Image (tube, helix red, strand yellow):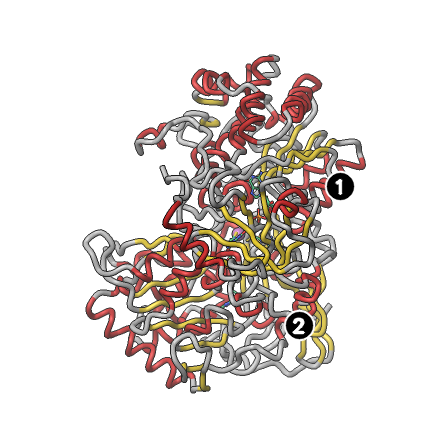
Amino acid sequence: MTVFTSLDPRMDPQATTPVPVVQPVLAVRGACPHDCPDTCALVTTVENGVAVRVQGNAAHPQTAGVLCAKVARYTERTYHPDRVLQPLRRSGPKGSGQFEPVSWDAALADIAARLTSIAARDPQAIMPYSYAGTMGLVQAESMSARFFNRLGASLLDRTICSAAGGEGFAQTLGGKVGMKVEFFAESRLIIIWGSNSITSNLHFWRYAQQAKRDGAKLVCIDPRKSETAEKCHEHIALLPGTDAALAFALMHELIANDWLDHDYIARHTLGWEALRQRALDWPPERAADVCGVPVEQIRSLARDYGQCFSSGEPAAIRLNYGMQRVRGGGNAARAVACLPALIGAWRHRAGGVLLSASGMFPVDRQALQRPDLLAGRTPRTLNMSTIGNDLLADTSPAFGPKVEALIVYNSNPVAVAPESGKVVEGFARDDLFTVVLEHFQTDTADYADYILPATTQLEHWDVHYSYGHTDVLLNRPAVAPLGQALPNTGIFRRLARQMGFTDPCFADSDEALCRAAYGERVDFNTLLDKGFASLQIADAPFADGGFPTPSGKCEFFSARLKAQGLDGLPDHVPNHEPWGRSGAFPLAMISPPARNFMNSTFVNVKSLRDMEGEPVLELHADDAAARGIASGDVVTVFNLRGEYVVRAEVSPRARPGVVNGMGIWWRKLSLAGANVNQLTSQHLTDLGAGPVFYDCLVEVRRADTPGTSNAASSANTLRASVQLQPVA
Ligand SMILES: Nc1nc2c(c(=O)[nH]1)N[C@H]1C(S)=C(S)[C@@H](COP(=O)(O)OP(=O)(O)OC[C@H]3O[C@@H](n4cnc5c(=O)[nH]c(N)nc54)[C@H](O)[C@@H]3O)O[C@H]1N2
Ligand SMILES: Nc1nc2c(c(=O)[nH]1)N[C@H]1C(S)=C(S)[C@@H](COP(=O)(O)OP(=O)(O)OC[C@H]3O[C@@H](n4cnc5c(=O)[nH]c(N)nc54)[C@H](O)[C@@H]3O)O[C@H]1N2
Ligand SMILES: [Mo]
């Protein structure tokens, strides 16, 4: 294998190496940049300077040479004819999507001048907005963070995905820590909870399959009969937002039958007596009623879990973020995180729970982000999940200055953030100056004043952690940047220079940033040689306690939460919009990921969009019949926040009372210019201030139903007479 090591000077201002003489065939090791737990190791075949193929690295055990359909087509994304390959300046009205080419120098000079004049009044009026378009530490959180810290811009609370569950785990286990994923292969019982692994965590599913072949039982807990649920032995199709009730009923049964590891509980947990009392309030009958599932399913799962204790066999829970996108998501994750300690599942390397592994990576964020550049300033923090409200807020003592400039990178908020009506209204403000760093002219980029062309993973350096396994990966550039594209780092470097930021840290090269991400904690030579390096973590990290909580124990009771004035114990916290099958909006809507998209990424790759077909709403036969809806009908889904139009699919994947609005389509590639987030709310979760995408009541009508073709007006009529359930 010939490994490509040279740098394009655009990526590295210090580099003296010219662009390499092109060699005929290269195999370049890299890492998948996408927001997925699997963080695959890639091998890109390059012929005459062109990436012709992206494959999974067979030498990396977690990847095992296997890629998902999306990333196997990564070259279609990199060489897509619609790539933005030069800076663009708005030439039409805001949001019109009309742009004209402009030179880098002109674009950067104008952007720097605008930001400098806003910053002279108050730099907090400048808002950065980014998420995980790339998970790479260098392209996501190094030069950009340095730039905004030096500027004194508003800080961003990056809550949009995992804040509730992450905080729930932090308060219970001490962080995003848990089982090592490979040991699921040895589990005897695997509970897949709020996760469609086949879609979103394919490489975990391989381990689950191995366990299944060896006789393990697989149980899936998910309102939707997902691709994963139908391949498990049991599927518990609970109502969205009722997971804590289920977890408490399991505890109730473990207590009632004394399937408890008293020794583990006594030595390694905090708050058992109080938790026990609370669990005793949750007999399975009560939970069955709240969750909308047969009581026998709950008893049976409790029996299976308890029997693992009795027989000394490992029971494992693969929790994923699908169950925490509701008001009580933080408490629900906390309740589930308590379960393994009750039966001492942590004693086995194949027992315990895994939500995210990211807390186990020793990333040196100080070195990457340089918070010292704040120089004593403490800018306000804006929550990315309420960007709609934030862009529409005026200056006030509580809020601080009105947002005057917005710099978006690695994210497509107009498509992915909740309550798009408000988000679009905010982006459409004529007095907002918006810069979007992108590969494509997304829904968000349509509202930009400037679009700056960013490189894809095949064109830049990066180094990665993972939230689904415990290996560090290095990504080398396989090809030179296309057109005039620059890595995010390069763009912020140039912008910093243009603004007169002279701190030497703005000259660090991308390779230097890759090295700084882990410092001495990970051997960089191993990364250079192999492309990946495994963290040194005990096989059963909590077999003898040692949780990274203040007490070192699994904290059923959290003194830290109590100190914030919250309940110190987990609880079942009902949805903001609880399901009741009555009222104007009797259906609960969830909007889980589509298999062939990655959030809103890849929606514009035609081969993948063809696989998804059209935006689809799955609904149960009873709910469809009650509304005269048949498969293939175009329907309008609506609530008081808005409406969107989709193709109905009467489907056994939907449970009664719950509709599934699949995937995050680009608005402009949808049936009528809006996607599912037109209906989701900006309410927040109990812990972590995350979004509640799956806590959303709606109604559905055939789009051609007389008098309701304009569902917004029907919603307006309803607004006069009904209220959504009050928000407590
Ligand atoms: N192909 C593909 N892979 C992806 C993504 C993608 O868009 N496409 N997204 C990536 C991202 S950003 C993330 S965060 C990860 C994980 O992303 P997650 O959002 O965890 O996605 P899934 O694993 O698909 O699982 C979500 C599952 O939770 C279910 N669910 C919804 N509400 C509830 C509830 O209240 N309780 C329970 N128990 N289940 C519920 C949904 O029906 C769905 O099957 O996946 C990543 N992987
Ligand atoms: N209704 C509903 N909404 C949801 C969810 C849901 O389940 N239901 N899931 C939520 C979740 S879990 C998440 S994580 C968020 C995801 O929200 P986002 O993180 O915004 O994810 P994407 O939609 O994939 O958009 C990422 C964008 O970054 C761009 N990008 C990729 N790499 C780079 C790069 O190197 N440089 C630059 N400048 N740009 C790059 C891509 O082209 C893409 O347009 O969405 C959330 N929204
Ligand atoms: Mo996510």
Local SS, label 2: helix
- Tag on residue 209? 1
Mark yes or no: residue 237 visible.
Answer: yes
Tell me whether the residue at label 2 lies in contact with that at label 1, contact meaning CB atoms closer than 8 angstroms.
no
- The residue located at (44%, 76%) in the rendering is 451
Circle 2 residue: 76
Location of the C terminus by quadrant is top left
In three-dimensional space, the C-alpha distance between marks 2 and 1, rounded to whole angstroms, equals 30 Å
Number of residues whose C-alpha sits closer than 10 Å to that of mark 1, classed few (under 14), some (14–19) or many (20 or more): some
Of 528 and 615, the residue lying toward us? 615
The one of 141 and 77 positioned closer to us in this rendering? 77
Q: Measured along the vertical axis of the image, is residue 75 above or below residue 698?
A: below
Residue 123 position, x and y percent, is 25, 65
Q: Is residue 219 above or below residue 364?
A: above
Q: Decide if ligand 1 comes within 8 Å of the CB at mark 1.
A: no
Residue at 56% across / 56% down in the picture?
A: 35
User: Residue 132, position in %: x, y?
Assistant: 50, 58
* Mark 1 element type: helix
- Indicate the amino acid at tag 2: Glu
